[in-house]
Image: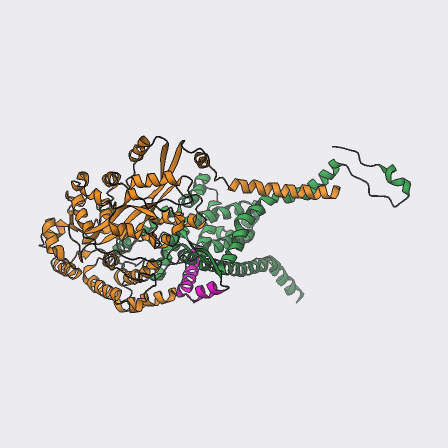
Amino acid sequence: MSVQSPAPTRSAPHGAPRAPRRVGFSQRLSRWDFKLSPYLYISPFFIIFAITGLFPLIYTAFVSVYDWKLLGGQGDFIGMQNYTDVLSQATFWKSLRNTFSIFALSSVPQVLVAIVLAALLDQNLRAKTFWRMGVLLPYVVAPVAVGLIFGRMFADQSGLINSWLGAFGVDPIRWHVDPLASHVAIASMVNFRWTGYNTLIFLAAMQAVPRELYEAAIIDGAGRVRQFFSVTVPQIRATVIFVILTSTIGGLQIFDEPRVFDAAGRGGASQQWMTTTLYLYDVGWGTQRNLGRAAAVAWLLFIVVVMIGLLNFAVTNRISSAGTGRPSRRQRRAAARSSRRSA
Amino acid sequence: MRKTTRKAWALAAGVMSISLLATACSGESSEGDDDAASGDSKVTLTVATFNNFGYTDELLAEYTEANPNVTVKQTRAAESADARTNLTTKLAAGGAGLADVEAIEVDWLPELLTSADAFEDLTDPSVEGRWEAWKQEAATSEDGRLIGYGTDIGPEGICYRADLFEAAGLPTDRAEVAELLGGEGATWDKYFEVGRTFTAASPEVAWFDSASATFQGMVNQIENPYEESDGTPKSLGDNSDIKALFDQVTAASADLSAGLTQWSPDWDAAFQSNGFATMLCPAWMTGPIEERAGGVTGWDVADVFPGGGGNWGGSYLTVPASGKNVEEAKKLAAWLTSPETQVKAFANAGTFPSQVEAWEAEDLKSATNEFFNDAPVGEIFANRAAAISVTQFKGPNYFQIHQTVTDALARVDVDKSEDAATGWQGAVSAFDSLGL
């Protein structure tokens, strides 16, 4: 295919402005290769995302403005009716409350514990891999199995935890009755499963922190704790932001754990622990079987997640830029010294 | 020209990658197509069931023996809820991917009948009179299409703990217990009254397990619990029948109920810790009781039910119209629900037949249950089935409404977070917010 292209004689006779040099196919190919290939290489993600992410998103928006029953299928166009219906159902607001409550009870301690665990695993331990794999073990357990085990532990009358509490003379906690108690129980399931996962992400980031920084810190006389706060945490800021964002998104979409918390999976008799995704499922496939409304719930949840995500991003970004922008202690000390000297 | 080739290349690359993905997603076409094309040759039929229908490999092999060109494959969902989600989701998608024969539970019928066209009409002279009339009517649409062949039913008796009865000074023999509870003329009031005698003697043991379950048994005896026969929902606030049952059961629960939710871990544990002495007992419930009460002796079944007979649960086999071998599937469904096969299924899994003729079968009549003190369960549940007189109407909104009431019962009986009056108010406002 390598037809040598330059044929200057062809255009020259006319004396017209010189035509651009013609390039051979192989050269052209390599130019395409240069320009196009990167996009092709990254395209599988975007194509898959378009099929499995973007299309359902848009189609859900389409469904949400129709009267759409699970079995009856598409009905009349009803505009924003589904949204107003959902917003006027008290259960929706209750589900948002529950979602945020469970999210706060799970994500916050989870990230904190994960970062500390990662710091511990980052030390010089015997049988490192054993300990590191150990923290991931709960993540491998299927959520339904976790639900079964925790369901037994948190049973109101016959549960393990209540009988332990009884041994200390504490009255049994009504895990399936009081909203806060049920949220704590569900959050503990979430934490059990996800803490190790986040730990490994933090650990990976910590491994990339240059060891010289620690050596310098040790020479400066910093202890373990001081090293953790002054070297480790600032160095893995980007990862912290990533973990906080992903666990926020995951936390707001929590479904498995509240679903398996009791046999009916409807979030309790007065919807004490019905999260928004559980509500979504109940509206679409549970008792109401109304896909139009379920789609509206999905979009409302999407908007909430995006808003919280943006807020989150703004806050964490601010913290991290404030961290780098703020003069370090050494700089401040130097500045203070020089100002003292000049005084 | 060159420029267009360049674009074409880019386009081709894009189209290629998309179509590669698209084809990867559509791996649905299978042997089914070939079978349909070649008429009489080998056919593989799929049957989708849940829990345990008693269709063992041996039983299905019998069908292949009689029909050598047919192989039957069963897929079994662990829970009926999984099967229901699978069925409705695929129906909503036009029926692609459904099995040739799909098992359904009686409770799904109201909504499935709203799209009766998605199922084959199974009316056939050869199966006329095979089932109790009410069983067949429940699966018949308004225009007379029969969408499912009945498999089992759930005639209710009373399961009780003879040892706890003895400790409380009550009779223990199942015939005497049936008399104690009122025999033929048993009523709910009588059932609760005996309960009070019992709890007076054994205050640490509850009389029944759950207010919601007891309420379920009572509601099953009302012909139009929540909806008129044309499907219009009754306003719950004005529904005096349901309100009366609600009041009756909450009043009784206060001192008779163990305050448990069926199928919860606490309920499971109560079987081992003498949590309650009696429970409503549809035929299929004997299995779950035995499963949970292993090692506990004294369970028995009394041939009696308050308020006459009652049916709780039971299943059907349907043939989705989108299937590729509907004729063969119909034949298989008819065979699986024939009295002879159903008696075998009863022996395999305790699913009580809905076929009138099966109740006369010697195998059924002589069936006993070892765990329940060798109770003649075949005979007892045949009697209980014969006592069922009410064809309950369940419309498309039955579940939404029933759920609001059982949630309220759970708040009163299990959570104890509300009193009966507040609970009822909550049920009414939950009903109103459904916007039916």
Relative to A30, say whether A221 is above or below. Answer: below
Q: Position of residue A133 (x, y in %)?
A: 44, 41
Q: Is residue B261 left or right of residue A12?
A: left
Q: Colour of chain B?
A: orange
Question: What is the basis of the colouring in this image?
Answer: by chain
For the point 48% across and 51% down, which residue is it? A115
Relative to B359, say whether B186 is above or below. Answer: below
Give the overall secondary structure of the magenta segment.
helix
Q: Colour of chain A?
A: green
Q: Position of residue A235 (x, y in %)?
A: 56, 51
In magenta stretch: residue A95 = yes
For the point 36% across and 40% down, which residue is it? B329
Q: Quadrant of residue B340?
A: top left
Q: Is residue B165 left or right of residue A193?
A: left
Relative to A250, say whether A342 is above or below. Answer: below
Q: Position of residue B22 (x, y in %)?
A: 55, 42
In magenta stretch: residue A85 = yes
The answer to which of B148 and A91 lies nearer the viewer is B148
Q: Position of residue B316 (x, y in %)?
A: 31, 46
Let me know if residue A84 appears in the view. Answer: yes
- Residue with the most extreme front position: B125
Q: Is residue A7 left or right of residue B378?
A: right
Q: Quadrant of residue B187?
A: bottom left
Q: Is residue B330 left or right of residue A127?
A: left
The answer to which of A223 and A260 lies nearer the viewer is A260
Q: Which residues are magenta?
A: A79-106
Q: Quadrant of the N terminus of chain A?
A: top right
